[in-house]
Amino acid sequence: MTGVPPANWAVDVAATTTHPIADGVWALRLPSPWHHISHANAYVIEDAEGIALIDTGSGGHPTALDALERALEAVEWRLSDVHDLLITHYHTDHMGLAGTVHAASGCTIWGHPRHDVFFEVLERPDEVHARRLAHARREGAGGTVLEACASTREEHEGAVPQPRPHRALAAGTRVPTGIGELVVVETTGHCPSQVALWEPARRMVFSADLLMRDFVSFCDVVEGEDVLGAFRASVERVAALDAAVALPGHGRPITDVPALIGRYREGLAARMALVEATLDDEPRSTMDVARRVFAADVPASAVWHFLETCCYLEHLATLGRAVRDEALPGWRRAGAAAGR
């Protein structure tokens, strides 16, 4: 994930809260250091042996660990009681403390096979930085946006050192927990390593950052991949579950899941139409399209909107509704003459 990382990774420990979800299930509302994200949710599932923990909140500062420990103490557990840690996706606000949890408990870490996208940044930072820089520059970014899009600060600063996952959260995998087996549903798009976890008896899905109470369609940019197409397919995969409740990565539980799915379908279609409507016979850079679609005067918002626009344009190209003009780098509507 790229953006404008926090200047300070400290969190407000006093803002930590916990909430019961069902018998043996707790939501941990963990404060976030990001200016536009107040918190991230982790979840505790109790059993006779201890707990399974879904996500950990941010790393990057000792106060993040203080917040997680405070939340666990509030529901009468400790880090050492974690026997399984399930990471919904490799964004630092969800797995930033995985290494600390593992060191304290010896837990089994579960993660999507594409966790390598995150670890590549740690292992080959110069290569990743150069690739991100070249992509953002080609799409018309400059100044603060260009710098932020190329940054690898989040991956290096926002999480403690950690091992790779021990077991794979691959589609269809069943993870035993105190409330029954959780079935892994692949929900990539927002992040290459994102999954949802489905508990069919209660019709309850841990939806991570796929579904929020308000429509959000931010996706990590992965060159050569139609990540927005993957996002749309993920929404439909969760829609097919017919869930009664969704437990998101941010915000309160969602009990009107079908209505929310409808808002996502409408929101995706409307945003695609807005992006497509900016295209004509003359090539436009992604940055130009983003400025026309979004009214963003906050630098961090401009970065996220630029990256989101990249994903919409790539998806429209996959659908045959937009064309990249290589002679004069930019995007034009499908059917328009090239090289003008």
Image (tube, rainbow, N blue to C red):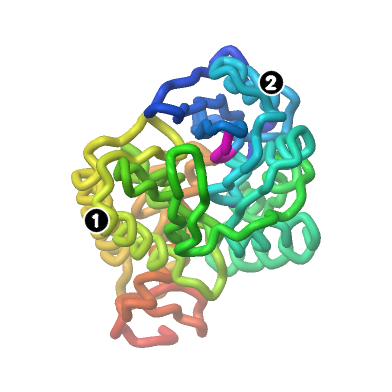
Where does the C terminus fall, quadrant-wise? Answer: bottom left
333 drawn magenta: no
Q: Which residues are magenta?
A: 51-55
**Residue 108: % across, % down:** 68, 47
Image position of 174 (left or right of 261):
right
Give the structural element (helix, strand or loop) at label 2.
helix
Residue 308 in which image quadrant: bottom left
What residue is at 32 percent from the left and 77 percent from the top? 319
Does 255 sit above or below residue 290?
above
Image position of 86 (left or right of 205):
right
Q: CA distance from mark 1 to mark 2?
A: 39 Å
What residue is at 32 percent from the left and 80 percent from the top? 320
**Residue 100: % across, % down:** 75, 36
Q: Earlier in the sequence, mark 1 or mark 2?
A: 2
Front in this rendered view, residue 244 or 122: 244
User: Which mark is on residue 25?
Assistant: none
Image position of 253 (left or right of 14):
left
Discs 1/2, front: 2
Image position of 63 (left or right of 47):
right
Tell me the amino acid under the disc marked 1: Arg
**Residue 246: % across, % down:** 34, 41
**In the rendered image, which residue does mark 1 sit on?**
265
Q: Is residue 171 visible?
A: yes
Does 73 sit above or below residue 48?
above
**In the rendered image, which residue does mark 2 sit on?**
66
Tell me the amino acid under the disc marked 2: Asp
Residue 260 in which image quadrant: top left
**Residue 60: % across, % down:** 72, 34
